[in-house]
Amino acid sequence: MELKEFCPLCKGDNRIEIENIDVGCINKFYSRKYAIENAVKNDVLTYRTCGSCGLSFFMPIESGTPEFYEMLQRNSGYYPGVKQEFNLIAPKISSDSSVLEIGAGRGVFADIIGIDQYVGLEYNDLAIERAKEKGIKLLKESIEEHSKNNKNMYDTVISFQVLEHVKDPRSFIESAIECLKEDGMLILAVPNHEGFMGKSINNILDLPPHHITHWNKKVFEYISDKFDLKLLEFICEPVANEHRIPAKKAIIQEKIRTILGIGYRIVDCGIVSQLTSVFSSLLARTLPINLDKVIGHTIIAVYKK
């Protein structure tokens, strides 16, 4: 069974086709914003939702190459510092806990929790070097590799903004659970497509080959049942300061497109869409839209093994 032919999480074939994606449009965006040429290699790309587990994904599945991520890192804002989600999770971790962070970046979360029994996994050499400068040791290996020799090792396993990049999330989650002690805590944080992220159009970093899956509450409930985990809580973060303009733009753009009768598309390079985007961006910087009840960028699922 080839992974690309089935849902990457539940491996089922109950797929609902949502949208045919304009690959040329995606590549144009990556070229203009990040100087990355031919970011998506496949000629055809479709966006689908799994009718069984609820995961949405792009097919064929195509993740970014190391060269792709090296190009992205030249953008100073690609690796942010302290994220809102870090501060939401840090109080849940006791000082005597053993913690494994998958996709540790530059070790910012390790700085925040300040514990001795911390292990971080990271593939990016620059991030590993930056963490080393702060005395944080990161291992350059996958969670699948790490789980082979570290079963039942950690009190807490965490990943922030990693699953949406992963070709095989099922293997990722299985390996993370193997690393947990009995009664250990698994924490998964991803972009929330039930919030403003799910309304955004042409959001380049939420498209392949950067993000290849989209997540929501239903998927995390499926994970709880499938992997025999107790779902302790969902945390939906409010709109962070750095996301206020994108959130307002998504709301305004959705209303304008509804009025014009053109509806929502993940990718839309049409002239009307381009004009609507520009107009929405201008309004987002001037209109006083209340975002208190708007769902923010990230959803966090907290499980007990």
Image (spheres, rainbow, N blue to C red):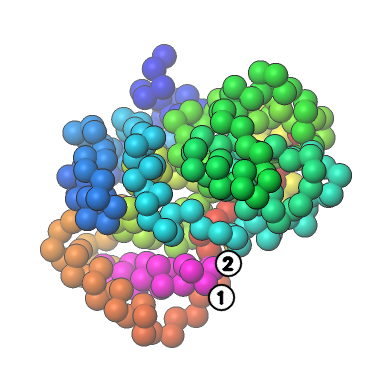
Residue drawn at (77%, 33%) of the image = 154
Q: Which mark is residue 292?
A: 1
Rendered position, 27 above or below 247: above
Q: How many marks?
A: 2
Q: Reply yes or no: does residue 135 show up in magenta.
A: no
Locate residue 93, reporting x and y percent: 78, 50
| Magenta segment | 238-257
Identify the element where label 1 is drawn.
loop
Front residue of 149 and 165: 149
User: For the stretch drawn in magenta, what is the main secondary structure?
Assistant: helix
Residue drawn at (40%, 68%) of the image = 246
Q: Quadrant of residue 5?
A: top left
- Quarter of the image that includes the N terminus: top left
Front residue of 290 and 172: 172
Front residue of 144 and 266: 144
Furthest residue in direction left, as rendered: 271
Mark 1–mark 2 distance (CA, rounded to whole Å): 7 Å
